[in-house]
Image (cartoon, coloured by chain):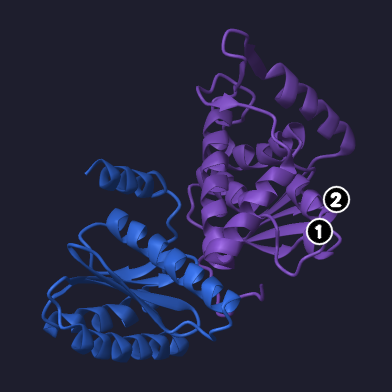
Chain colours: A blue, B purple
């Protein structure tokens, strides 16, 4: 608990920083994220800029979204670096299994990352199918704006 | 209306006397410095070490996340620095003191050894540019360790963003358009409402 308070506080400390994403970007993505509601075991999701700045999210607070976004960008960044070092080609998606849940991060077009929190009992195959579809759609929407 | 604030070499020398000497106090018991009454401990740090933090982070998490983490730290520094400077009695009250507070950013940076620069602010368009004709200290340190193809000063970009936003009461971010660490003649930071980055710079 102490760790999560620290993380939330850190995000809150930077609240004066957060640049408000343009309304057309946010609204283009909201519908896509809410489409996850039909996926059993889905908990929340965020679309973040490649540097970790939240563009849109479904979490309870902006501070929680800021933490998830920053960590998702770092995860994707380190996975890309690892892929480069090991000469394994481009990054596609990452799955992190925890005792209490699952985090999936994937690229969503050239300028964004999609992060999804899922329950530990989620049907992962079904979830990945849905996440892949939504990430493609998010990428297309961002390109159109 | 367009505002321009420049620091001459003579003003830079005077700012050094004020910012790095007169406003700096030393707590001999702690062996720690404090600046302008701020409770935050203050110390001399080689600019190259800030660049090293960026390079290490870039190798681990990639350019963009590393840039943002460095930017956020710089942002807090700029925001807090402007907050402390807002209490200085010399600051004027026209425009609520906002433009005057923005202008003091160049004096503080030059006086603290970050680089002598100039601010151009167009209050019609809202665009703010911070330029350092000789480069920032971090940019110069980056250049000394070898040219690279990515900008070197997200820390300074964050600093000027924090200072600008705190001064003007706006929410903008800054991108590095020119960097001496890349071989450009100067360092240039320009405000944008929301940065959209589409390509990852090569490692």
Q: Is residue A9 left or right of residue B182?
A: left
Task: Decide which of A100, B78 is in the foreground and name it.
Answer: A100
Task: Decide which of B130, A114 is in the foreground and name it.
Answer: A114
Q: Position of residue B179 (x, y in %)?
A: 76, 60
Q: Position of residue A94 (x, y in %)?
A: 37, 76
User: The disc numbered 2 marks a residue on which chain?
Assistant: B
Q: Is residue B9 left or right of residue B191?
A: right
Label 2 near label 1: C-beta < 8 Å? yes
Mark carried by residue A139: none
Q: Quadrant of the N terminus of chain B?
A: bottom right
Q: Position of residue A39 (x, y in %)?
A: 14, 83
- What is the spatial separation of the Cα atoms under label 1 and label 2, in whole angstroms? 8 Å
The lab-note entry on whether marks 1 and 2 share a chain reads yes
**Callout 1: 10 Å neighbours few (<14), some, many (20+)?**
many
Q: Is residue A46 left or right of residue A107?
A: left
**Above or below: residue B189 compared with residue A134:** above
* Residue at 21 percent of width and 44 percent of height: A1
Is there any visible trace of residue B1 in the rendered image? Answer: no
| Residue placed under numbered mark 1 in the picture | B180
* Residue at 60 percent of width and 62 percent of height: B58
Q: Position of residue B136 (x, y in %)?
A: 77, 48
Hey, which residue is sitting farthest front in the picture? Answer: A86
Kind of element beneath mark 1? helix
* Residue at 50 percent of width and 22 percent of height: B39
Is there any visible trace of residue A77 in the rendered image? Answer: yes
* Residue at 21 percent of width and 83 percent of height: A124
User: The disc numbered 1 marks a residue on which chain?
Assistant: B
| Residue placed under numbered mark 2 in the picture | B134
Task: Decide which of A63, A102 is in the foreground and name it.
Answer: A102
């Amino acid at each position: 608990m102490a760790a999560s308070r620290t993380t939330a506080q850190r995000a809150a400390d930077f609240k004066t920083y957060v640049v408000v994403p343009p309304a057309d970007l946010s609204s283009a993505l909201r519908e896509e994220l809410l489409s996850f509601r039909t996926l059993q075991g889905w908990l929340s999701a965020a679309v973040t800029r490649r540097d970790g700045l939240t563009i849109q999210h479904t979490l309870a607070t902006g501070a929680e979204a800021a933490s998830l976004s920053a960590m998702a960008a770092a995860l994707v960044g380190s996975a890309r670096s690892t892929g480069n070092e090991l000469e394994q080609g481009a990054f596609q998606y990452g799955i992190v299994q925890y005792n209490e849940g699952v985090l999936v991060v994937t690229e969503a077009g050239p300028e964004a990352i999609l992060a999804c929190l899922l329950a530990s009992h989620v049907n992962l195959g079904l979830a990945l199918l849905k996440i892949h579809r939504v990430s493609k759609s998010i990428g297309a929407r961002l390109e159109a704006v | 209306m367009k505002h321009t604030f420049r620091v001459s070499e003579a003003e830079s020398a005077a700012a050094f006397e004020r910012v790095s000497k007169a406003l700096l106090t030393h707590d001999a018991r702690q062996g720690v410095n404090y600046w302008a009454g701020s409770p935050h401990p203050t110390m001399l740090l080689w600019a190259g070490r800030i660049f090293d933090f960026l390079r290490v982070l870039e190798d681990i998490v990639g350019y963009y996340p590393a840039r943002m983490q460095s930017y956020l730290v710089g942002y807090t520094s700029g925001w807090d620095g402007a907050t402390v400077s807002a209490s200085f009695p010399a600051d004027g009250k026209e425009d609520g003191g906002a433009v005057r507070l923005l202008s003091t950013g160049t004096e503080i940076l030059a006086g603290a050894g970050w680089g002598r620069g100039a601010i151009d602010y167009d209050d019609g368009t809202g665009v703010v540019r911070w330029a350092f004709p000789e480069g920032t200290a971090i940019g110069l340190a980056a250049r000394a360790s070898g040219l690279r193809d990515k900008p070197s000063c997200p820390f300074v970009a964050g600093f000027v963003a924090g200072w600008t936003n705190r001064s003007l009461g706006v929410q903008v971010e800054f991108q590095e358009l020119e960097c001496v660490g890349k071989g450009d003649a100067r360092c240039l930071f320009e405000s944008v409402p929301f940065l959209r980055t589409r390509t990852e710079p090569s490692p």
